[in-house]
Amino acid sequence: METSVMDTCYVSCCANRTPNVVSWGRGGLIAFGTCNSVAIYNPQEIKIIEVLNKHTGRVNTVQWVYKNDCSSETQLVSGGSDNNVIVWEKHGGKFTVCAVCSGHSGPVCAVDAVSLSSHLLLASVSSDSTVKLWTCTSDKAECLQTISFGSGFVMDVSLALLPGSRVPVLACGGDDSKVHLYVQNNELFQRVLTLAGHEDWVRGVEWAIRDGELLLASCSQDCLIRVWRLFAKTAAELEQQTDTVIKMTEDVFEVSGAVFAVTLETVLAGHENWVYGIHWQPPHIKGDSVDQPLKLLSASMDKTMILWGPEEDSGVWVEQVRVGEVGGNTLGFYGCQVSPDGSMILAHAFHGALHLWQHDHSQGEWKPGVVVSGHFNAVQDLSWDPEGEFIITAGSDQTTRLFTPWKRKGCSQITWHEISRPQIHGYDMQCLTMVGRFQFVSGADEKVLRVFRAPRNFVENFANISCTSLEKILGSNEIADLPEGASTPALGLSNKAVFQGDLASQIPQQDTDDFNSRSDQYKEAYFQPLSLTEPPTEDDLLQNTLWPEVQKLYGHGFEMFCLASDSSRTLVASACKASKAEYAAILLWSATSWKQLQSLAYHSLTVTQMAFSPDGRLLLAVSRDRTWSLWRRENPGSDSEPRFSLYANTSKDTAVHSRIIWSCDWSSDNKYFVTSSRDKKVIIWGHCGSVERIGEHDDADVSPCSSVLDVGDSATAVSICPFLCSDQSYLLAVGLENGKILLYKWRPLDDLSSGSDWSKCGESDYCQSHTLVVKRLRWRPRMGRAEEDGNQDQSWVQLASAGADHAVKIFNIKISTL
């Protein structure tokens, strides 16, 4: 297999909002479902090392197949909303699809598997009210049995082997508040016991093997956890069935001559809301035998995780550790996992964020750890800062996020992280553009544009995390008058600046009952300045990394759709959704006074993307009406307010594209621009046969300079690399509706009939591609890689992509070899 031209540098993503979607393997790797993919995450390196793409619907459940000898797993099972269960197997360090189990008629919401001598036994739960059991060998998967629950649902399943035998036992937790036990007998599973006690839906069940007995933990929406003990009864015990001893009630069942009993070991009460997830610390090899630690982790909607275990002296189960989040506007935890050595615990929350705590042995306490993070809905837009040191993204999850490389002192390992969440909004975000180094404009599903400027606290922390000096970052900019941070009023959408004086006045007063005003009763969740040497936790991102809003821009009649700013950062162009010509006008704003300068009317439907030429003289707009328009600045170089007039355009008669034009971009020399469309065509335009830049002459014709490139699918994003290849050709990245990213080289030729002006030089492979539409592609404005210090390797360029599959990806491409 040829090596890929594109090397994945960074993937930002988060866990799906389902309870069973994260699993921590004995090999130290965490697998979790993110949109339609399974991400393999290394918590030691703090980076996504592989993305598995095969599901065509959301991945709802992921589970490693544990081995009896406690060695690293080689198999992984995932289930999704495409009604399929997929078994992945690791070969030569890479995961491949081993088997696809198709048969459910509804989304799969939980899976578990146990390895038998000749095959894998797999149980899957679906919202079609059934549990299916499958046998998987290396080349095929067969459905062994379907257990129907009528009008009820099963929430979770767990498989184990009965003590002292190789007979599989299956536990199912359902919406009837009961735990059902099934045992395999003559190939088929038969119900042997129903464990009652919970008073609401059973959300999670999990087996653990200890001292020849099985322990089953079950958690429920009644806020309680129950631990049951399953053991084999000896012949002597069966004979001594006298009533003289007070004992726990036992439920007894028989399997091929052997008698087994189940008793309730303990009930754990400590959570104040639904308990969604439970997880036993994995067993490990101790001496010659396998040792199962008696440690049980639980995660609840009350935003806490509790680690439970029996006291050494009395054997009574007690709460040993409690960690979690306080305050904020988030919902609680969906599930939890313990690392193989028990030193780290992980929870995933409603908003997809992973929360990790590490045990600090020197101080004996648990501390939050750094994890990967990302959007939990489609990423609509992204922008590099002018220096190419960080990217800022906007998503349908109502947030904008800022990512940068974390450079640790004395450590060669550099990883990308989210270090700020400048805007947390009440509307889905649609677009943003950087205006200068630490200022951006964003647009959402509202008619208003909002301008944000970085506070002092962000600039200081950015300097710490990226290991650069404050003076170098700010240049001549004065930091003294910047606000310290920002906070959002309880019922507001605007981030208010918080100054040094505001922090001083926050010192808590003595508690008194006489409130002076209504507002005193509802104190704002105030910003606390952070001094960061590592990326912030989710809690801090939500509350303490907001940027103050400095301006609102009114003028559009419908939801915002796209934004662009010029290279000198003096102009911003904006456009909104439009079904009539009167709403499709582009508005131009001054980036200094924030006044509306001009309204540019030409298009009849939504303007889908805009781009200023690198020299700032021209503004290109492409539209849903299948045409493009080019606007020229009338008075370049003068101090008066800029005025733009229509310079060139296509009309319905002259349009080359036959469908909506999605994207556009400029070449760095101002000679050409590119358009990409739903009709699968990519076309480069300019003054053909001329070496002059576009817009130099009044009467020059702008026409296609390239042959029409058919990329095979709707071309939703396009970007021209600002640096030429070694053979002086232009490098383009094209993003497709199916998630693929293609790389093409283009060079101007006189004869376009042959189509030889285009040459394909690479594409994203199956693991690198997005699983849904590529929304935006942006090249880093400087050569080299952002994570390199100082003298950057000039043979590399970086490409950032944003997708509807919630992912942001950064690729390294060696331009010197293309």
Image (cartoon, helix red, strand yellow):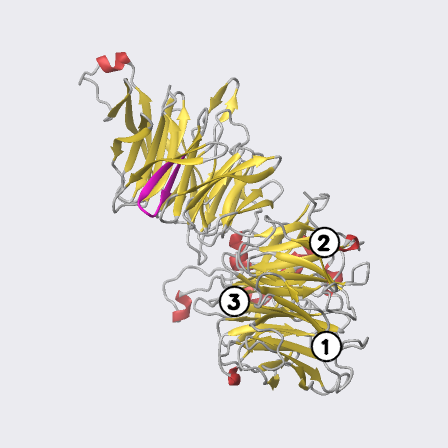
Indicate the quadrant where residue 541 lies. bottom right
Whole-percent x, y for residue 694 in the image: 75, 78
Give the quarter of the image for residue 516.
bottom left
Q: Whole-Å distance between the Cαs marked 1 and 2?
A: 27 Å
Does 199 appear above or below 463? above
Q: Amino acid at mark 1?
A: Gly
Observer-side mark, 2 or 3, equals: 2
In the drawing, does residue 405 fall left or right of residue 79?
right
The reply to whether callout 1 and callout 2 are in contact (CB within 8 Å) is no
Does residue 463 belong to the magenta stretch? no
Residue hosting label 3: 429
- Helix, strand or loop under label 1: loop
Give the percent coordinates (x, y) of residue 546: 56, 63
Q: Residues within 10 Å of mark 3 (few under 14, many from 20)?
A: many
Given the current orientation, which residue lies at the most extreme left position?
243
Horizontal and vertical percent for residue 596? 60, 84
Q: Is residue 714 visible?
A: yes
Which labelled disc corresponds to residue 616?
A: 1
Q: Amino acid at mark 2?
A: Ile
Residue 202 in view, yes or no: no
**Secondary structure, magenta segment, majority class:** strand
Q: Earlier in the sequence, mark 1 or mark 2?
A: 1
Residue position marked by numbered label 2 in the rendering? 813
Residue 198 quadrant? top left
The residue segment tinted magenta is 122-133
In the image, residue 646 lies at what x, y percent? 66, 85
Task: Report if the CB atoms under discs 2 and 3 are less than 8 Å apart.
Answer: no
